[in-house]
Amino acid sequence: MGVKIEFHDGRSVEYENAVRVADSKNDYVLFDESGAVLAHVHKYDVKNLHTKDPDEKW
């Protein structure tokens, strides 16, 4: 899986090795295969969060 996050300020970032997204009340937390945290972002900063399968192209 991969994750692309688009922010309200126009920035975007991609995490190709993200395998899990935890969704809490105020935050998204992205994890890799080993369980390490790749990113911790506040929902209010996020405009769009896209996930994709490994064979999909952005």
Image (spheres, helix red, strand yellow):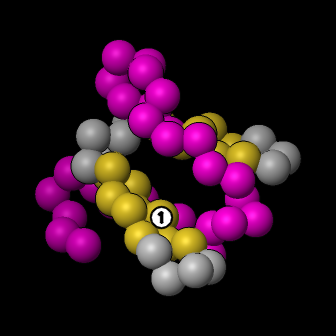
Residue 32 point in image, percent of width and height: 37, 30
Q: Note whether 48 is above or below 32 in the view shown.
A: below
* 51 falls in the magenta region: yes
Residue 1 on image: x %, y %: 32, 47
Q: How many marks?
A: 1
Q: Viewed as shown, does residue 37 lie left or right of 33?
A: right
55 falls in the magenta region? yes
Residue 24, above or below 5: above
Residue carrying label 1 = 5
Residue 48 coordinates in the image, percent (x, y): 56, 73
Nearest to the observer: residue 40 or residue 53: 40
Q: 25 left or right of 36? A: right
The residue closer to the viewer here, 19 or 12, is: 12
Residue drawn where x is 36% and y is 41% of the image: 18
Q: Quadrant of the C terminus?
A: bottom left
Q: Quadrant of residue 17?
A: top left
Residue 3: % across, % down: 39, 55
Going by the numbered disc 1, the residue's amino acid type is Ile
Which span of residues is magenta-colored? 30-58
Q: Is residue 28 visible?
A: yes
Is residue 50 something one can see in this rendering? no
Q: State the residue at coordinates (43%, 35%).
A: 38
* Residue drawn where x is 20% and y is 64% of the image: 56
Residue placed furthest toward the right:
25
Decide which of 53, 7 is in the foreground and name it: 7
